[in-house]
Amino acid sequence: MHAPVLVLKDSLKRESGSKVHHANIQASKAVADIIRTTLGPRSMLKMLLDAGGGIVVTNDGNAILRELDVAHPAAKSMIELSRTQDEEVGDGTTSVIVLAGEMLHVAEAFIDKNYHPTVICRAYNKALEDAVAVLDKIAMTVDVKDRGSMLGLVKSCIGTKFTSQFGDLIADLAIDATTTVGVEVGQGLREVDIKKYIKVEKVPGGQLEDSKVLKGVMINKDVVAPGKMRRKILNPRIILLDCPLEYKKGENQTNAELLREEDWSVLLKMEEEYIENLCMQILKFKPDLVITEKGLSDLACHYLSKAGVSAIRRLRKTDNNRIAKACGAVIVNRPDELQESDVGTGAGLFEVRKIGDEFFAFIVDCKDPKACTVLLRGASKDLLNEVERNLQDAMSVARNIIKNPKLVPGGGATELTVSAMLKQKSSSIEGIEKWPYEAAAIAFEAIPRTLAQNCGVNVIRTMTTLQGKHANGENAWIGIDGNTGEITDMKERKIWDSYTVKAQAFKTAIEAACMLLRIDDIVSGIKKKQAPGAGQGPSKPKIEDEGDADNDNLIPE
């Protein structure tokens, strides 16, 4: 017998083969089980304590998983899934995870039977293509201009969220906000940039019913000299600057040696004249409001207020962009480059109001704003955070519909239709791939099943009835009403989902399942590269004196 050969270092752990597959599948199922109960309108909330001791109460799949600290690598990639889903389409974060978990769960049986993962993946990909084809078939187009159907759509998306008890409120806010900032790109395409042009301002106090979408922008600033400057201006002319209105100091320390006393006053005068010039260049355009991202010295402030111009300084760049979009101004970098066309005249009203104990400047009643602020009021901070998360989801859904106005039925009806179609097709598939393909079809049923579980109805009975209804393919729109657990036609109940969200969820879930199935080896314990210059010293003592850092003098060298 030869002596055994050591290839890997002792410190490395290596697992391979079916053991890894099982571990990965277990881990992914665990993640899916965490957020399984948050699917559907009868969903539970999760309360998470973060490191700072703050609490997050939410049922947004992504928000929950974002807070979790996960050790297992497979579970980590599951969490990535919901993040992708959140960034791509903004909704369906929970269903993606549940679906991927289920896909892996049905694959487990095949791995036990020594199917090769590649075969399973091939079947899954085939199933995915067919599933998307089915989606295309049952999708129906919606008129973006028709507010009623848009409302129904967004409402069914937030119906699963905490704010559903405020009904139309959030849906209204979301639709108002997204239709405001939609920009025509040409060729009938709409581009809606939620992150950039919709600002959500959370102001504690008041009631949720006071929340509204402002036709313009609101910023958490007051004018520079509250006593002297006007706080309410009708139809203001707004100039946005990106430069400081103060005397620039030299780059490095400059010493000026003055021999005569008069020279000193000349120096001061030059500084004053410089600022006066800047202000005069601005005042030429008779603005009513000057907003700058940088500083504004007392002197400049004096010149401006003497001319009856209100000024706001040190504004965030993002806010400045929003104001520019809202009132049609152009942000100018140097005062001498100002032109008449740079002045924003689109706003109907500038005013500073006190909400709670802070001052907010409103630039509202804009003619054709391309940016807006959603003002959220609510009793507590946690509530506001949750409302904001739901609003993000709702706005994403509204955006998806504006971009791609296609609908599929909600309430698990889509998944059931897909599942039924795939089951029919599976009989025509040759060879070994048939079984995983069929299993993928069954996996799609996880979503309606979970919905039924969360409603607390008899799951088995409901599922068999639904499968029977879908098997003969008479009506693709039969699904579960998540509130009551009844089996109804989703068209009548106005329970819709956006096509983009569903398609993305299917793709993400199946691709992730394939990726995790393909892993057959986990090597852990790979040493971190040492910092250069740390020297390749023996690593053993190092470990010791980290543990005994306080009594390291006891360690014999």
Image (cartoon, rainbow, N blue to C red):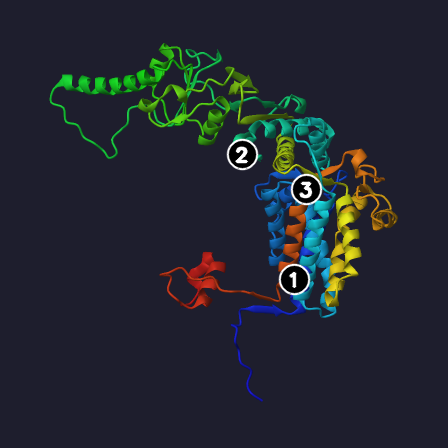
In-front residue for pair 261/117: 117
| Residue at the disc numbered 2 | 186
Label 3 crowd (10 A; few <14 / some 14-19 / many >=20): many
Amino acid type, callout 2 = Gly
Q: Is residue 383 above or below residue 521?
A: above
Residue ID for mark 3:
499
Please name the amino acid that badge 3 sits on.
Tyr
Q: Secondary structure at mark 3?
A: helix
Nearer the N terminus, badge 1 or badge 3?
Answer: 3
Left or right: 391 as drawn, with respect to 553 = right
Q: Earlier in the sequence, mark 1 or mark 2?
A: 2
Residue 26 visible in the snapshot = no
Q: Quadrant of the C terminus?
A: bottom left
Label 2 SS: strand
* 415 displayed left or right of 377: right
The residue shown at (56%, 82%) is: 4
Q: Position of residue 484 (x, y in %)?
A: 83, 37
Amino acid identity at mark 1: Leu
Task: Report x, y in % for residue 169.
Answer: 68, 26
Closest to the observer: 100 or 478?
478
At x 18% / y 18%, what residue is drawn?
A: 266
Position of the N terminus by quadrant: bottom right
Q: Is residue 257 above or below residue 110?
A: above
Residues under labels 1 and 2: Cα distance? 43 Å
Residue that appears at 40% across and 15% down: 287
Which mark is nearer the camera, 1 or 2?
2
Q: Position of residue 489 (x, y in %)?
A: 82, 38
Q: Residues within 10 Å of mark 1 (few under 14, many from 20)?
A: many
Could you tell me which secondary element the residue under label 1 belongs to? helix
- Quarter-wise, where is residue 271 in the image? top left
| Labelled pair 3, 2 in contact (Cβ < 8 Å) | no
Q: Which mark is residue 517?
A: 1
